[in-house]
Image: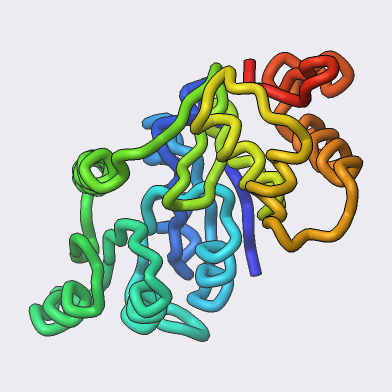
């Protein structure tokens, strides 16, 4: 398994993260370099199985450039698995075979676009850019709700939180606490209200549980957890956002 993250050549790392799955190292290098020069972060895999693991665990993945002929799991099967698992990351399939049936199969298993080798890197980058643009438009159209507070963005439908566009791993309780705060900006919540909303009415325990989870949440989202600016304590009442 090979997993390498190449830092983009400049600071514009937010244009997108692309996983390049290609067992021919020379082609893999050329694609990675071309994408890097455009400011993309690049993840690399040389076989289908490692690619699947990366697709499942990457904090961020905006696009997959996927070769058809690969060791372990081939590109067509990998794409089929991703779609079966409801992973809708855009896939640009590449293949040495100029065979039309291969291309049709690629699109049937859920690839978004198809490119036949040999291809120019400018064409590959243009196709990647077009796919990312299209998926961003669809993202805006389907995800109406996102709560933002400073650098924090919370996507309730996806149970996902980012800070400055970097993924933050929250436990389910931490997520539900933050969701409650961000969907009701500046509202003060008592510990009892938070217990009821997040833990449920049947929860047996005391309000110290809330303080513990707030502390953990602060450690993940505050610049300085000992001087919180996001989840603030309202003395004698509880907590609020901002
Ligand atoms: Ca190959």
Is residue 213 positioned above or below 97 on the image? above
Drawn side of residue 120 relative to residue 150, left or right: left
Q: Position of residue 208 (x, y in %)?
A: 91, 41
In the rendered image, the quadrant that contains the C terminus is: top right
The answer to whether residue 67 is seen in the rendering is yes
Q: Give the residue drawn at x 65%, y 22%.
A: 188
Furthest-left residue in this view: 100
Drawn side of residue 56 relative to residue 40, left or right: right
Q: Judge by depth and name the residue closer to the eye, 73 or 235.
A: 235
Is residue 169 positioned above or below 67 on the image? above
Is residue 197 positioned above or below 98 on the image? above
Is residue 141 positioned above or below 234 on the image? below
Q: Position of residue 218 (x, y in %)?
A: 78, 30
Q: Give the residue drawn at x 44%, y 37%.
A: 40
Q: Position of residue 74 (x, y in %)?
A: 40, 82
The answer to whether residue 115 is seen in the rendering is no
Drawn side of residue 207 relative to residue 146, left or right: right
Q: Judge by depth and name the residue closer to the eye, 133 or 138.
A: 138
Q: Judge by depth and name the residue closer to the eye, 22 or 153.
A: 153
Drawn side of residue 82 relative to residue 153, left or right: left
């Amino acid at each position: 398994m090979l997993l390498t993250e190449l830092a983009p050549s400049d600071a514009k790392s937010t244009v997108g993260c692309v996983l390049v799955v290609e067992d021919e190292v020379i082609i893999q290098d050329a694609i990675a370099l071309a994408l890097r020069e455009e400011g993309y972060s690049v993840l690399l895999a040389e076989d289908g199985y490692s690619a699947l693991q990366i697709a499942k665990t990457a904090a961020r993945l905006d696009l997959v450039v996927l070769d058809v002929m690969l060791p372990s799991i081939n590109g067509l099967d990998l794409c089929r698995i991703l779609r079966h698992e409801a992973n809708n990351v855009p896939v640009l399939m590449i293949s040495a075979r100029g065979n039309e049936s291969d291309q049709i199969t690629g699109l049937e298993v859920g690839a978004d676009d198809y490119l036949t080798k040999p291809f120019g890197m400018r064409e590959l980058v243009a196709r990647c850019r077009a796919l990312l643009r299209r998926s961003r438009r669809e993202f805006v159209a389907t995800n109406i709700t996102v709560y933002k507070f400073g650098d924090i963005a919370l996507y309730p439908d996806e149970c996902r939180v980012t800070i400055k566009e970097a993924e933050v791993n929250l436990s389910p309780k931490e997520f539900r606490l933050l969701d409650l705060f961000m969907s009701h900006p500046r509202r003060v919540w008592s510990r009892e209200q938070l217990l009821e909303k997040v833990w449920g009415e049947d929860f047996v325990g005391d309000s110290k549980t809330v303080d513990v989870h707030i502390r953990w949440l602060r450690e993940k989202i505050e610049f300085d957890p000992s001087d919180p600016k996001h989840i603030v304590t309202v003395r004698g009442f509880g907590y609020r956002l901002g």
